[in-house]
Image (tube, helix red, strand yellow):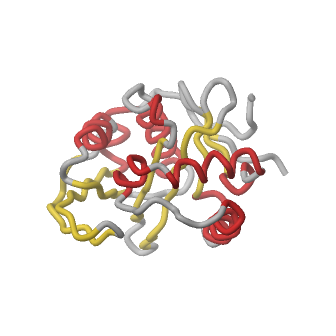
Amino acid sequence: MESLCLKGEKVILRPLEELLNDENLKKIYSWHRDHEVMFWLGCRPVQSSFSGFASWFRRSIGKLDQDMAFGIIDGTGELIGRISCYGFDGARKEAEIGIMIGEKHLWGKGYGRDALITFLRYLFNEKGLKRVRLRTMDRNGRARRCFSKCGFRESRRVILTLEIGDVPGVEMTLSAEDFHKIFDGRKEPCRSATF
């Protein structure tokens, strides 16, 4: 069976479970130990050993549907982040998205936006979702600008209960209809990796 691959303009998304070799796990571990990366996810940096983290991370990813948790790969073939979809409401055809770019030197350079647009196209076109939502800290201006450029609109203010404590946040939503009004005519998902 061919590996699922979603191709954007700057990134390729591949099932994260397929990418969990030692090199990539060490990279993911370094992201999870970085105070700034983890702060914006609302988490505390990982304190465990690499082997403990690797076991926990593999188990966590294994609980997600393989076609809903992707690694974000840049044009050089390097893993730079991850994106996933969870919290499905089958009756309403809605779900929640989470994204992280772990390589801080790539923040603000369009990789997150491209990964998100690529993933949204897949969720709306291939998986039949009608609406997606995401949540972020109110003070995370970079993420909020990225999400707005992808068509998300603030739907409500929330208090996020995170590892770092309760913080003001926003929930943003996007319908398939609104996404297609903005982005129709862009690249479709591919089914095999090109790098």
Q: Nearer the viewer, residue 180 or 25?
A: 25
Can you give x and y, in whole percent of width and height, for residue 62 in the image?
67, 68
Can you give x and y, in whole percent of width and height, for residue 180 in the image?
37, 39
Q: Nearer the viewer, residue 180 or 123?
A: 123
Quarter of the image for residue 63 reads bottom right
Can you give x and y, in whole percent of width and height, for residue 166 in the image?
22, 70
Q: Residue at x 42, y 28 (%)?
A: 110
- Side of 133 where 27 appears, left or right: right
Compared to residue 106, the image places residue 84 above or below, namely below
- The C terminus - image quarter: top right
Can you give x and y, in whole percent of width and height, for residue 10 in the image?
54, 26
- Side of 36 where 173 appears, left or right: left
Can the viewer see residue 65 in this picture?
no
Q: Nearer the viewer, residue 163 or 92?
A: 163
Compared to residue 129, the image places residue 77 above or below, namely above
Of all residues, the one furthest to the right in this rendering is 1
Q: Residue at x 60, y 30 (%)?
A: 74
Quarter of the image for residue 127 reads bottom right
